Amino acid sequence: MMLGESVAIVGPGAIGLMHLLAFRAAGASKVIMLGLEKDRKRFAAAEAAGADHCIAADKENAAEAVMEYTGGNGADIVIETASSPKATSLAFELAGPHGRVILFGLYPRRCSVL
């Protein structure tokens, strides 16, 4: 990661929060946490740990929100920690034109994500 890059993290669980802390310490300009409406308590923890924005992807258009929060560029780095094929597809939508997507989740042996 380069200083000042934007980061979107899909999955506000323990692994997602660990990534949030690491990217904050590394100098990310914005860190955006994505999850579901049921993750509101986890969003509170993410905000306390330094998340700039938290998005409930089942209640709002996550791709549009990330584009808005990144000035229309998309995220420079997207981390997928939710272990969900749907979340993985979303991760690719959130990345900017030269963005990097890192799949950190665990998947079943046979899983089509794209």
Image (cartoon, rainbow, N blue to C red):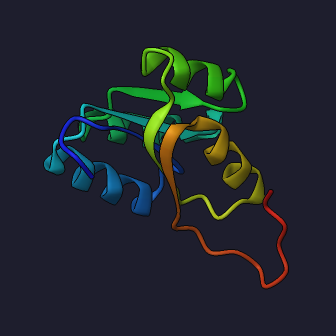
Q: Is residue 79 visible?
A: no
Q: Locate residue 102, reporting x and y percent.
A: 50, 61
Residue 33 image-quadrant placement:
top left
Q: Locate residue 53, reporting x and y percent.
A: 40, 25
In the image, residue 113 sits, relative to residue 64, either above or below, namely below
Q: Locate residue 93, reporting x and y percent.
A: 66, 38
Work out whether residue 38 or residue 36 is closer to the camera in this orientation and state it. Answer: 36
Residue 28 image-quadrant placement:
top left
The residue shown at (73%, 49%) is: 89
Work out whether residue 1 or residue 27 is closer to the camera in this orientation and state it. Answer: 1
The residue shown at (23%, 47%) is: 2
Residue 8 image-quadrant placement:
top left
The residue shown at (69%, 22%) is: 61
Residue 47 appears left or right of 55 = left
Q: Locate residue 23, reporting x and y percent.
A: 26, 49
In the image, residue 20 sits, relative to residue 110, either above or below, namely above
The residue shown at (34%, 56%) is: 19
Residue 69 appears left or right of 55 = left
Residue lying furthest bottom = 109
